[in-house]
Image: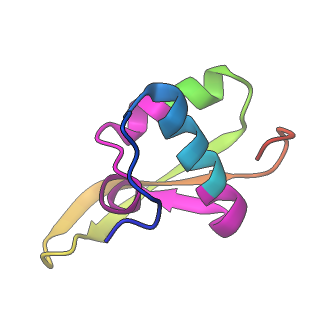
Amino acid sequence: MSMLPPTSSGSTEIQHVRIIKHFKSCGHLDTFEARDDLGICAPAARILELKEKGFVIVTYLSTLVDSQGISHPRSATYFCNGRHPRC
């Protein structure tokens, strides 16, 4: 179930805003949360774009389990440490 209301646009900027809001509320975001809860199909690309805009985001790789119970090694969890004023 999506945590954010549906939008008519999946634009990159809207996806950036979703990620930033999630970081503000939780401090971290994993690949499956980005895809399942935020509707972001390519979270790694969006994180890279935010890094290029000055966000300090650390990537931690680990084995995560998806909603179907399948383990995925080397899945990303992203942490924003708050150095950027919007994070």
Residue occupying the point 64% across, 68% down:
26
Residue occupying the point 54% across, 48% down:
18
**Is residue 30 located in the magenta-colored stretch of the structure?**
yes
Please give left or right for residue 58 compared with residue 63 in the image: right
Please give left or right for residue 78 compared with residue 66 in the image: right
* Above or below for 54 versus 21: above
The quarter holding residue 85 reads: top right
Q: Is residue 47 visible?
A: no
Magenta segment, prevailing SS (helix, strand or loop): helix
In the rendered image, residue 12, in percent from the top left (x then y), is placed at 46, 27
The quarter holding residue 34 reads: bottom left
In the rendered image, residue 24, in percent from the top left (x then y), is placed at 71, 59
Query: Viewer-proximal residue, 8 or 79?
Result: 8
Numbered range of the magenta stretch:
22-47
In the rendered image, residue 14, in percent from the top left (x then y), is placed at 51, 35
Q: Is residue 23 visible?
A: yes
* Above or below for 1 versus 32: below
- Quadrant location of the N terminus? bottom left
Q: Outermost residue toward the top?
A: 52
**Is residue 33 located in the magenta-colored stretch of the structure?**
yes
Residue occupying the point 48% across, 38% down:
15
Q: Outermost residue toward the bottom?
A: 69
* Above or below for 81 versus 1: above
